[in-house]
Amino acid sequence: MKTKVITATSIILLALAVTVVFLNRSTELKAPVAHSMEPEKGCVFMTTFGEQSSEGYAIFKSDAAIITAIDKGLDWLSQSQQPNGGWGAGLHSMQHQMDPHSVKTDPATTAMVAMAILRSGSTLKDGQYSSSLNKALNYLLLAVESTSKDDPYITTNRGTQIQSKLGEHIDAVLTMQFFSNLLNHELNDDKKRRIERALDICVSKVQMATDDQGKVKNAGWAGVLQSGFATNALESAEAVGANVDKKILEKQRAYQKGNVDEQTGDVKTSDGAGIMLYSVSSSVRATAKEAREAEEQLNKAKEEGIIAVEEIVTPQALERIGFDADKAKKYSASYGVYNAAKEQAQRDDVMTGFGNNGGEEFLSYLQTGESLLVNKDNDWKTWYDKISGRIVKIQNKDGSWNGHHCITSPVFCTATSLMILTVENDIDWLTKLGENTKI
């Protein structure tokens, strides 16, 4: 009996020794990082999309816990800002580099962080992170203003994580979105005019980069997301008064719409790295505005007694309430695609995305959630209820979040996490985007 105990103890000690050696060797194989990337500690994407268990996440879902997580994340981002006012995700070839101060700044990442700060409550005039926001704005304005008219890009940086995975034009796309969001706030006249001029430059570059199919050129690994965010950004720019080419915007919407069959729910994933999530989240966002108008107009006609209350959105029903034949067909298709894509995008098996999830999955989920608000779809409450507690649970101790494939950048992932946790602050803005009037 004594021999058996000694033997068992020896085996346990040997196993522990082997484990220590293995972990040490794993650490030696990695470049120095600012914080751990160990997946077993909780990856925002792996947990959110089902690869890791989220059992018990509901206890993290209190308002106080969410506020604390947001505060920690904002503080981490503030400390990660570089002297030139920007933030960076790093190179695609250096995905293991996690120190936010050891990477070169880029407009796409800076714009995403700036949007997170703005959505979290700080403005150019006041708020805890007003200074950081002003520095980020100046960085982005200089980047845009320094580009030549003939240059298709707003930055000379090439090969960033965000460009490689989403597309070469993503810097202009996300910067356009930030400028549009900012113009929805009160600004002094001089600053407003400067931002509007920079916005027009971004609009022009993205429109020139859109091909005849409605896709944004020079796409990355998950190029459908670049195109999806471009459609979002052009809609937002149009809403704040920018001169957007309606034909180009319509081509972009048609391309996104074409990725989902409204009848069968089948999804075309060839431009989304073969991942259904990337395509359906872009489709649901691109069709949200038209789907909302179709439903609202039909409901209005029911209230006025123009059409029977049991009618559903179909081309025939929309024609009977005043849509011309082409518009009725188009808006009915948008309604069908929106609902099919919305359901697909929230299925557990679809949300797993690539499997070992990176920033692309998280961006896709953000698109889905914002789309629900653009559509004034009450399902957004269920979406937020599902995701908020899970994100809080797996936040890194230093306040950041990170990914485990493709877009691994803690800066970009932290900004995206905060965009989701604070989405309620932008309900008015997002729902207005679903209207046909300029804001």
Image: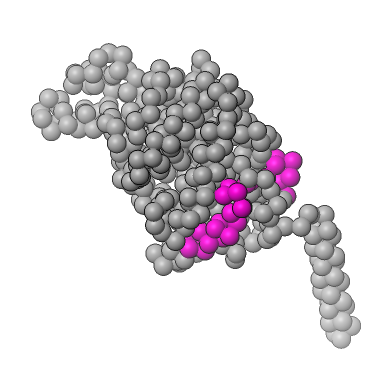
Image height of 21 relative to 226, above or below = below
Residue at 80% x, 58% y is: 26
Residue 217 percent location from the top left of the image? 58, 23
- Residue 38 in sight: no
Residue 84 appearing in the image: yes
Residue 322 position within the rendered picture, expressed as x and y whole percent measured from the top left: 19, 19
Q: Which residues are magenta?
A: 69-96
Percent x, y for residue 359?
59, 44
Quadrant in which residue 23 is drawn: bottom right
Q: Quadrant of the N terminus?
A: bottom right
Nearest the eye: 11 or 195 = 195
In the picture, residue 76 is in which quadrant?
bottom right
Which of the two residues, 147 or 253, is positioned nearer the viewer here?
147
Seen at 48% across and 51% down, the residue is: 133
| In the rendered image, the vertical position of residue 240 relative to residue 358, given as above or below | above
Say if the magenta span includes residue 85.
yes
> Does residue 187 appear left or right of residue 231 in this picture?
left
Q: Position of residue 160 (x, y in %)?
A: 66, 39
